[in-house]
Amino acid sequence: MAEPIRITKVPIPRPKPKDSELGFGQIFTDHMFVANFQEEKGWYDPRVEPYAPIPLDPAAAVLHYAQAVFDGLKAFRGVDGKIRLFRPQKHVERLNLSAQRLCIPPLDPELSLASLVTLVGLERDWVPRKVGTSLYIRPTIIASEAFLGVRPAKSYIYFVILSPVGAYYPEGMAPVKIKVEDRYVRASEGGLGGAKTGGNYAASLLASEEAKHGGYTQVLWLDGVHRKYLDEVGTMNFMVKIGNEIITPPLSGTILAGVTRDSSLALMRQWGLTVSERQVSIDEVVGAHRAGTLAEAWGTGTAAVISPVGELTYRGDRMAINGGRVGPVTQRLYDTIVGIQYGQAPDPHGWTVEV
């Protein structure tokens, strides 16, 4: 990283919210990180400045052709008072992979990591103290060039904003109800399913709203071709335990390469559990439920960490899982990952970075 990061602080910091007042992504800190890109200059002028609206021309490419990517990770205040980022290098890598898919110039990984560490370090007083809370970090790249032709933009803005958050789902660690979606499609092979870009989330809104009106927390997406193989559940990767086998859909380009997914797979293999990354059909899940071998199901993601699934509904057929209780593998994953994040458990993989 050739250019140093300039820092401009707010004159008077705002009061910090109480941990009990935190929702998810509704409160933002005093500062943000910004850098710019122009085709002839590359990435330049990295800076921390007071949180404020970003000026955009009405013809900016991001507003018309959705050329934008983002990521999401967290900073945690440990029981020892130290502030830790969880696997930031992996998130930096994923942001660049998403950018590649949308013809966005990659960030220097050193600059990207420095932007996170510098900003969180400056805003360390915003990191909440209660276990279960965290400082959510949202790095984003948008196409800022003003034009109406359909091509990759020649100028971009990279920015990072921070938000102190509580639990993503109001249920917390309580098992959630999931609707299996077989009408709408989130992504297909060859599309954008493997990139973290806004269009994927916009495409999920209608099905998610219909599911919520039906009393469900989220939807479980099926593949876009056969409408039978499991993909993702809402904003999370999905795992299911049938008999002694733990199954999660493979990274075939239709689902996000989740960092919590990767962490969970590493831990379960370390524990000697039988883990498969393979296609699993909804028919296999229904059959396992009828046979009494559908033992556990859960989602994995940065926002919720581990979210147990207590009930799946497919075409009106309600399938209770583990009696609607949190299963042992689900609980162990949650306890282990959260323990590492808050400095309560050893970190043999070197996943955390202290700020």
Image: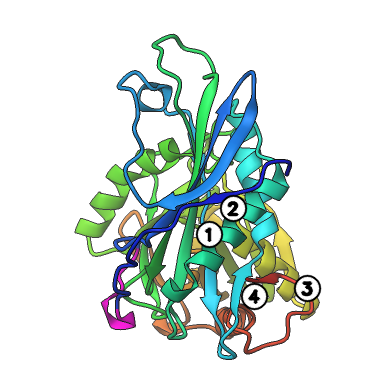
Q: Which residue is mark 4?
A: 243
Q: Mark 2 or mark 4: which is in front?
A: 2
Residue at the spot 31% in from the left edge and 63% down from the top edge: 27
Q: Residue at x 58, y 48 (%)?
A: 256
Q: Which mark is residue 119?
A: 1
For residue 173, side relative to residue 315 (left or right): right
Q: Secondary structure at mark 4?
A: loop
Q: How is the image coloured?
A: rainbow
Whether label 1 touches label 3, CB < 8 Å: no
Mark nearer the viewer, 3 or 4: 3
Pick the front one: 7 or 78: 7
Circle 2 residue: 115
Element type at mark 3: loop
**What amino acid type should be assigned to the residue bearing mark 1?**
Leu
- The CA span between labels 1 and 3 is 25 Å
Give, as a single range, the part of the protein colored magenta: 18-24
Q: Is residue 240 left or right of residue 177?
A: right
Residue 349 is labelled as: 3
Residue at the spot 49% in from the left edge and 34% down from the top edge:
157
For residue 245, above or below residue 44: below
Residue type of the residue flagged with mark 3: His
Question: Given this view, does label 4 or label 1 mark the residue nearer the observer?
Answer: 1
- Is disc 1 placed on a helix, strand or loop? helix
Q: Which part of the image, by quadrant, shows the C terminus?
A: bottom right
Q: CA distance from mark 2 to mark 1?
A: 6 Å
Q: State how far apart marks 3 and 4 are (Cα).
A: 28 Å
- The amino acid type, in three-letter code, at marker 4 is Gly
